[in-house]
């Protein structure tokens, strides 16, 4: 069963760079769009709220696979310009998950106590100053954990890019290895699962570090896992 383990690992590892680049690019675009959409939905201007809400509902409410095919196959027919597969994948990952992230930003900003807004007003801060110097630093602490879940979901969604011929981990396993080693399909997919799990754990570690740093930035102590579950000193829940 493990006769070709070394060969399988070498072939699958060739797909890791594409998976990592797609994930990181998608995360960067997701964060930017999340902030724009989330703050847009809280704008006092109605037309800004309508545009932000439309973006969120369209990209959250339609199939990610169809979005990918539309960007890669249909859009070039309309504009006469074709994106490289990896760039098309990053664009879809960012747009799709940015729609979910917009709701995270909106909820986190609204979760900041009203007294904080009133204190900033009492200090004669402008609306922009209130947002960037008082509200957002506190809201970021609430955003980081759900964004961690969103980033891991984005990593898993990156496997869809194999459908448009991006040579990521899934493509290397499904299209390169499996047709030539049909008797070892189980091993191939186990190795693929392990690789995605390792990448997800790395994201979790980074997000946990960001969570602690964001909490420290506003003078809070991160909640310990045991206390978050409501356990007492003896470990009882």
Image (cartoon, helix red, strand yellow):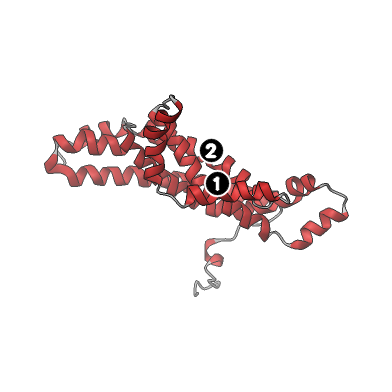
Q: Is residue 129 visible?
A: yes
Question: Which mark, residue 127?
Answer: none
Q: Position of residue 197 (x, y in %)?
A: 36, 47
Q: Which residue, given by chain and number where applicable, does mark 1 sit on?
A: 55
Alpha-carbon span between mark 2 and mark 1 = 14 Å
Question: Which mark, residue 29?
Answer: 2
Q: Considering the image in quadrants, where does the N terminus appear? A: top left
Q: Which residue is the extreme one toward the left? A: 183
Image height of 28 relative to 207, above or below: above
Q: Position of residue 97 (x, y in %)?
A: 49, 46
Q: Residue at x 40, y 38 (%)?
A: 70
Q: Residue at x 83, y 57 (%)?
A: 119
Q: Position of residue 16 (x, y in %)?
A: 36, 34
Q: Quadrant of residue 142?
A: bottom right
Question: Disc 2 or 1, which lies upstream in sequence?
Answer: 2
Q: Quadrant of residue 164?
A: top left
């Amino acid at each position: 069963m493990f006769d070709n383990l070394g060969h399988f690992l070498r072939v699958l590892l060739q797909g890791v760079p594409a998976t990592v680049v797609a994930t990181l690019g998608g995360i960067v675009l997701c964060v930017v769009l999340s902030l724009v959409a989330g703050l847009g939905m809280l704008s006092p201007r109605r037309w800004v709220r309508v545009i932000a809400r439309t973006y969120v509902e369209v990209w959250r409410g339609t199939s990610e696979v169809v979005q990918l095919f539309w960007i890669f196959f249909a859009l070039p027919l309309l504009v006469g310009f074709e994106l490289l597969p990896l760039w098309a994948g990053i664009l879809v990952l960012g747009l799709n998950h940015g729609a979910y992230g917009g709701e995270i930003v909106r909820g986190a900003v609204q979760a900041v106590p009203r007294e904080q807004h009133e204190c900033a007003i009492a200090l004669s801060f402008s609306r922009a100053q209130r947002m960037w110097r008082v509200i957002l630093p506190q809201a970021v602490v609430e955003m980081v954990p759900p964004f961690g879940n969103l980033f891991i979901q984005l990593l898993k969604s990156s496997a869809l890019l194999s459908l448009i011929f991006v040579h990521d981990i899934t493509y290397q396993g499904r299209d390169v290895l499996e047709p030539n080693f049909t008797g070892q399909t189980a091993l191939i997919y186990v190795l693929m699962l392990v690789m995605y799990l390792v990448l997800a754990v790395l994201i979790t570690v980074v997000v946990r570090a960001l969570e602690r740093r964001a909490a420290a930035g506003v003078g809070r102590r991160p909640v310990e896992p045991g206390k978050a579950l409501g356990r007492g000193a003896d470990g009882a829940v």
